[in-house]
Amino acid sequence: MQLFANLYARALSWAANPRALYYLCGLSFVEAFIFPVMPEVMLAPMMLARRARAFFYANMSLLFSLLGALVGYALGHWAYEAIRPLFSAHVQAVIASWVATLQQDMQEHWLTMLGALTLAALQPVIPMKLVTWAAGIVGVPIGPFLACIAVGRGKRVWLLALLVRWFGDRAERLLRRNVEWVGWVALGLLAALALWLLLR
């Protein structure tokens, strides 16, 4: 089943639209807290079409990713409290233990936690929405949270801009060839993490 390839094809059609910049901003925004497709699938063809504006597109995507990260953080903070009574007592206890452990780690090893948050925003395997929701649930201070997301996600989109400027069409072919397995691996890791938290 080619779920992510189909979503990628849809994103490519958006990238060719005259309103592509608006779609890129919207995709970057919702991907940070709910949508499963990374904004890079629109960024790559947009950058290839207008290479001189590659870093402009990267910065716009980053800006709206940060705005979306704030939404994910707020959902993690407030929505979790609202839906917590829907979980069984066992699941609530597991989540409470996990949150308490992370909060203690954050207080005792805050530099390590900030480094982990930056790395989580940098790599494409752990979905961005998991990072933003978890940060809101745990209560990571908002300033350091945004700084880590900006550095991690910024490196991703700026690296893509560099690749497009240097390698052109080859960069887009690499993304097209690997989008399906990257999407499924990310989804599988998310499901495995959720299962581990429930059974821990």
Image (tube, helix red, strand yellow):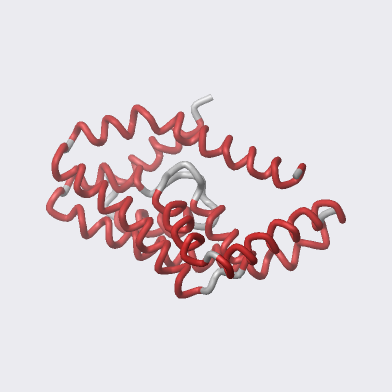
Q: In the image shown, does 165 or 110 lie closer to the viewer?
A: 110
Number of dots carrying numbers: 0
Figure check: 177 above or below 150: above
Q: Quadrant of the N terminus?
A: top right
How far across and how far down the image is residue 136, in percent?
A: 59, 66
Q: Quadrant of the C terminus?
A: top right
Figure check: 19 above or below 75: above
How far across and how far down the image is residue 3, in percent?
A: 51, 32
How far across and how far down the image is residue 184, in percent?
A: 52, 33
Q: Residue drawn at (64%, 38%), measured in percent from left and top?
A: 192
Q: Residue drawn at (32%, 34%), measured in percent from left and top?
A: 175
Q: From the viewer's perspective, is 3 left or right of 38?
A: right
Q: From the viewer's perspective, is 38 left or right of 50?
A: right
Visible residue check, residue 76: no
Which of the 4 image quadrants contains residue 87? Answer: bottom right
Q: Residue drawn at (74%, 56%), measured in percent from left and top?
A: 95
Q: In the image shown, does 14 or 106 lie closer to the viewer?
A: 106
Visible residue check, residue 13: yes
Q: Residue drawn at (74%, 58%), measured in percent from left and top?
A: 97
How far across and how far down the image is residue 50, in percent?
A: 16, 49
Which of the 4 image quadrants contains residue 151? Answer: bottom left
Q: Which residue ends up furthest to the right in the rendered image? A: 89
Q: Which residue ends up furthest to the front in the rendered image? A: 108
Figure check: 46 above or below 102: above
Q: From the viewer's perspective, is 77 left or right of 162?
A: right
